[in-house]
């Protein structure tokens, strides 16, 4: 594990998102999921970290909208609050919360 930077109670880990030991982390208010992966793989990574999300926490889920773009199917335990496209980048943003 490599910790690259700690500042203002933020720590960045360079790790595998699918196998990262989440017990190293405290509960979080926000999960930012911005991975260059297909929708299914990005959702698997998100699901791995969901146990850390606080009750009123939010998720910003980012998908690249290139040639292979597929609309994600979020867990039934998640509520879609908003979605919008980037003006310049080929990305779609989803704001989610727990039900």
Image: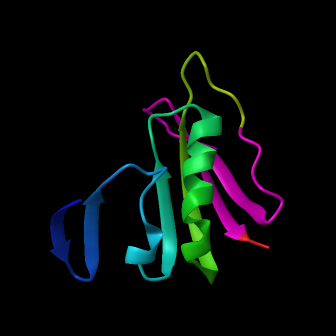
On whether residue 86 falls in the magenta region, the answer is yes
Residue 61: give x, y in percent of width and height: 56, 52
In the displayed structure, 7 sits above or below 96; it is below
On whether residue 85 falls in the magenta region, the answer is yes
Residue in the image at 66% along x and 50% along y: 83
Residue in the image at 50% along x and 71% along y: 30
Quadrant showing the N terminus: bottom left
Please tell me which residue lies in front, 25 or 85.
25
What is the span of residues highlighted in magenta in the rendered image?
A: 72-97
In the displayed structure, 39 sits above or below 2; it is above
Residue 29: give x, y in percent of width and height: 51, 79
Residue in the image at 46% along x and 53% along y: 19
Q: Is residue 93 visible?
A: no
Please tell me which residue lies in front, 87 or 62.
62
Along the horizontal axis of the image, is 5 left or right of 79? left
Residue 48: give x, y in percent of width and height: 57, 59
Please tell me which residue lies in front, 50 or 84.
50
Quadrant showing the C terminus: bottom right
Residue in the image at 43% along x and 82% along y: 26
Which quadrant would residue 66 be assigned to in this image?
Answer: top right
Q: Is residue 42 visible?
A: yes
Along the horizontal axis of the image, is 70 left or right of 34? right
């Amino acid at each position: 594990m490599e910790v690259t930077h700690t500042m203002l109670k933020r720590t960045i880990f360079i790790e595998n998102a699918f196998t990262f030991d989440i017990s190293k982390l405290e509960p979080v208010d926000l999960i930012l999921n911005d991975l260059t992966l297909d929708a299914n793989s990005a959702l698997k990574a998100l699901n791995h970290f969901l146990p850390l999300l606080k009750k009123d926490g939010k998720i910003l889920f980012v998908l690249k909208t290139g040639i292979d773009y597929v609309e994600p199917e979020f867990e039934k335990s998640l509520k879609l609050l908003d979605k919008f496209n980037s003006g310049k980048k080929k990305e779609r943003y989803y704001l989610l919360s727990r039900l």
